[in-house]
Image (cartoon, grey):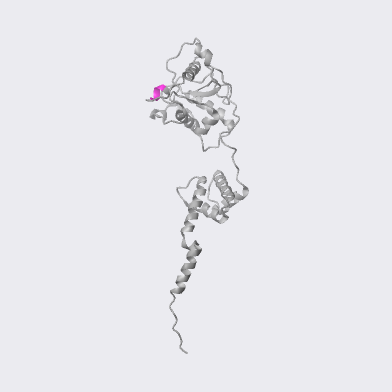
Amino acid sequence: MPRIRTIKPEFWDSPDTAAADLRTRLLYIAMWNWADDYGIGDATPVRLIGFAFPNDEIPVSDYPRILSEVSRAYGVVFFEHSGRRYFVIPEWEKHQRTERRAKPNEALIEAANAAISAAQRPDAESPRNSAEIPPLSDGTSGAGTGEQGNRGTGEKDDDSPTNATHHNATTVEAIVVENAAKPARNHPSSAARTVVRQTLGYAGYPRSTIDRLATQVDRLTREGQPDTLIRQALTAWDRRPNCERPEYLPTVLSDVLKASRASPATNGHDDKVNGYLAFANQPRQPEIEP
């Protein structure tokens, strides 16, 4: 369950943040929300990437590289425990204070601490290439400033292996993701693209926006909405300054439909009544006596 966390001001100008790309920075912040009260979170790529970027179409093939980059930039340690994949943020205790913590999973915390110790050993190596998620026994943590978002190691542990390290430190090979976080992207029909282009003309929108609008046009067409109403909704969407997302098109169509029903000119019953009233109010012609 995601939680509210504190992001300190020094995160934004830390050297590690400056060296990371924007997507890596966002993912790292999301991991703080995703982690439990002990800085440990579910590292199943489908769930983690899906939580951090719910509205973005990210290819499954990019997942290993994205997770590898957040490990390189911020020292996040990935490990495996009881057949499940987790991450742990080594600097958690320095930057988060939780008054009421959930009941700890001692075995999981012990495995996380063992993974951190293994990652902070002087002989720890980086992943062989960016397509691999950092294995537990190698790790990627390095010396840092100790700020939130930096890879501060604190006091180094003894290099001699411990029982916890041997029992819980399981080498995690590159993660192979079988299922995407989202269904395959639906491509709009050429007919829907034509409707969008004919209605909006050369409005200067990028192709991605046109495609997203066309996807909504396909959806509305499947629902049985009239072509004229869909085109009116496209025009209204284009003219609304606060309507940025193409996915708002169905809402705009509903507004257009409600507005048309509220207009007397589109109500046949009102037209008939108004016609009767106009006829009744005509001045009477004087009768001609024979």
Farthest right residue? 190
Name the residue rendered at 42%, 27% in the picture.
14
Judge whether residue 62 can be spotted in this image. Answer: yes
Residue stretch in magenta: 93-97
Residue 118: x and y, percent? 50, 16
Instruction: Tell me the quarter of the picture where residue 84 sits.
Output: top right
* Residue 258 image position (x, y, % from top left): 48, 55
> Residue 80 is drawn in which quadrant?
top right
In front of the other: 100 or 251: 100
Q: Which residue does the image show at 54% across and 55% down from the upper left? A: 229
Residue farthest to the front, as pictured: 290
Of all residues shown, which one is farthest toward the bottom?
290
Q: Is residue 151 above or below residue 255?
A: above
Residue 134: % across, % down = 54, 22
Q: Residue at x 46, y 62 (%)?
A: 264
Residue 213 included in the magenta stretch of the image? no
Q: Residue furthest left?
A: 99
Q: Position of residue 156 (x, y in %)?
A: 45, 14
In terms of image quadrants, where is residue 144? Answer: top left
Question: What's the magenta bit mostly, secondary-structure-wise?
Answer: helix
Q: Is residue 237 something one can see in this rendering? A: no
Along the viewing direction, whichever of 141 and 108 lies nearer the viewer: 108
